[in-house]
Image: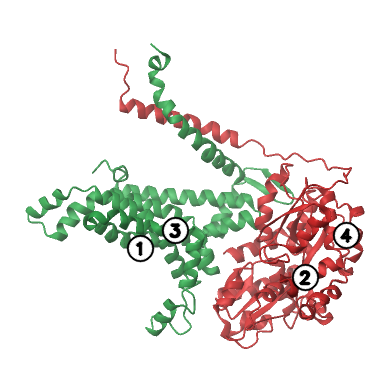
Chain colours: A green, B red
Amino acid sequence: MNWFHRHRGLTPYLLLAPGVVFLAVFFLVPLGFLAYQSLESGNFDIGFSFTWSWSNYWDALHNYKAQFIRSLEYAGIATALALVISYPVAYWIAFRGGRWKNLLLLFIVAPFFVTYLIRTLAWETILSDNGFVVNTLQSLHVLGPSGRLLATSTAVVTGITYNFLPFMALPLYVSLEQIDERLIEAAEDLYASKLQAFLRVTFPLSLPGVVAGTLLTFIPAAGDFINAQLLGSTNNHMIGNVIQSKFLESTDYPAAAAMSFILMAGILVAVFLYARLVGTEQLTGTAA
Amino acid sequence: MTDELTRRQLLERAAMGGAAITFPGILAACGSSGSKASEGTTSVEQKLAKTLNFSNWTLYMDTKGKTFPSLEAFQKKTGVHVNYVEDINDNASFFAKIQGPLSRGQSIDRDIVVLTDNDRYLSLMIKKGWAEKLDKSAIPNIKNLVDVQKHPNFDPNRDYSLPWQSGMTGIAYNDTLTDPVLSVDDLLEGPKLKGKITVLNSMGDAMTLVMLSNGDDPTKVTDKTWNAAYSRIKKAVDNKQIRQFTGNDYAPILARGDLMAAMSWSGDIAQLGNKHIHWNVPEAGGALWTDNMLIPKGGNVYTASVYMNYVYDPKVQGLMEAGDPKRKIKGIYYIPPVKGAGEAAKQYDPAVAKNTLIFPTASMLSKVKIFDSKALNNQKYLEQWGNLVSG
């Protein structure tokens, strides 16, 4: 018997090792360092020292409550919009796409061959005050003569929705594509209307995709700062902008680190509540 | 005997493995991040390096197509190839990039970097000992430094830094969209400009302009004058008068016509060359700032000093500034810190030599002020300003 045979019990650990080492080095170590930093006090000129300075957390929550709430609000609206926009698209591709499925999926992903920054800057041109969109909305009296889209919350939410759309559309497609169409036929044979068949069969079976898509969209969206920076005004800044400016402009590392942890906690709580609401088995797909 | 693992065992052991690695990881990360102080080199070797690594801001060198004529001429003269990198977009983020290695005593592989005097990072570099002393024996042309720049308070004897270019902060407006915008009052309170203006996110620039408009002295900031200026800008934010705070990214927005006016830098507008966009020093006065060359710790002092000497030759500086239309060389278009550069520039391009954005008149210079350097390092001000700009 060779060594591997005798130590078969080790197999799972060996298989895990690369992933665990990667996570430890590139996720846990920096996270631990960030936690340490978030409890420091001092400033860049005189240096920072570790003092269990929990006040960093209270100050951050107290001073930036508006930005925390705004981040969750924008991310929530953008996630809901992305779901409403993607679901019909994913549904249509999964059930009606036929041999064009792959090409249609490519169309969803195609804009992402262009870098994030350029895509967001493109919206700056599209929503420009003298652009086609604003002029059209003004002539339809949706916007007042001095109304604008750029540097408003509408532009920020639009940008986030657009930038994270594929993270919603692709998981939705995967779960819709796996649905056995005979189940829907069976529902119709049992006198369910099209709507009932959708609500009682198709939609519940697609829930794993909905859950995965909303999480993949909401989590990065809540921490985003590019959209708010380029498409928003000072009144639309999200917590990501504050963290970015604390880290890079005011070199207030403890405050920035504390805010990162608060954001992380906020997202975890939101995800936890959501998971309780729809059930965790939807995420792993075991219910299906 | 069955030594096959069940799926459940596999998962359980995997989970244990995951948990086991977590805590040591965190602990290891909490180790002290103490910095080793690097020893300064005392004896300077007077031997040229093969390459000079130079980090500068974008659009800050004379160009001919995609080449840099003055850098090529330097190579011809000395044999030193200049590796010219345009990787500085604003002081804060460039400093954030280099402060890690510098605080650990590591080289950043640069021989010259350029930082602005109206932000706190330039003086911080010198104060923290992250800048090498210039080799003045290699810079006889230092005698051409303009008098006003000889004794700045962050480097009283110019031991560590030399000006690269200066510029002014004022107001630009688009004449197809608005009447002339000549004062901070118009900019921050003019009802017709609501939502159509931007303010610079650089504290020194913005505060200088607003304090001068308030009738206060930006070279000696007090809590009272700070608060007055701060609340005035805050009010303009709350009223949605100010659309955004920007770095030099206001230029495309202004050119596109989404802005009527913007607090802006003179050279950007000179380079933009749009006949509908006008730049002026506000009635109450504007800001003057200077970008300074520094040799970061570990840079080659002698080679960097030889290069500084080269650009302080008025003939070289004049050509860099004005360019040469005959040879299709485009100039820098900011304000040169070198005496005699204006005279030299006239030979190449008389029009540029007359441009007051590049060679400002005495009356313009008398209206521009340098922001209080103590206020730049005031933690309370920095925090308030950071919150205003990012909140």
User: Judging from the image, what secondary structure is the residue with disc 2 in?
Assistant: helix
Q: CA distance from mark 4 to mark 1?
A: 58 Å
Give whichever of B118, B254 is nearer the camera.
B254
Residue type pointed to by label 1: Leu
Quick one: label 4, few (<14), some, or many (20+) residues within 10 Å? few
Residue located beneath label 2 in the image: B321
Q: Amino acid at mark 2?
A: Glu
Q: Which of A61/A221 is in front?
A: A221
Q: Position of residue A25 (x, y in %)?
A: 54, 36
Left or right: A147 as drawn, with respect to A63 = left
Q: Residue at image x 43%, y 26%?
A: A13
Q: Is residue B197 above or below residue B134?
A: below
Question: Which mark is in front, 2 or 3?
Answer: 2
Reply above or below: B247 against B9: below
Question: What residue did someone put label 4 on?
Answer: B156
User: Real-space Cα distance between discs 1 and 2?
Assistant: 52 Å
State how far apart marks 3 and 1 are (Cα). 14 Å
Mark 3 = which residue?
A72
Q: Chain of mark 1?
A: A
* C-alpha distance separating marks 4 and 2: 26 Å
Q: Classify mark 4: helix, strand or loop.
A: loop
Tell me the element at label 3.
Answer: helix
User: Is residue B13 visible in the rendered structure shown here?
Assistant: yes
Q: Residue at x 44, y 28 (%)?
A: B17
Question: Disc 3 vs disc 1: which is toward the camera?
Answer: 1
Left or right, A228 with respect to B167, comes to left
Q: Is there one chain holding both mark 4 and mark 2?
A: yes
Tell me the residue that label 1 is attached to: A81
- Who is closer to the viewer here, A170 or B186? A170
Q: Residues within 10 Å of mark 1 (few under 14, many from 20)?
A: some
Query: If you read the primary sequence from the N terminus, does the residue marked by circle 4 or circle 2 appear first?
Result: 4
Q: Looking at numbered disc 3 in the image, what kind of residue is underneath it?
A: Leu
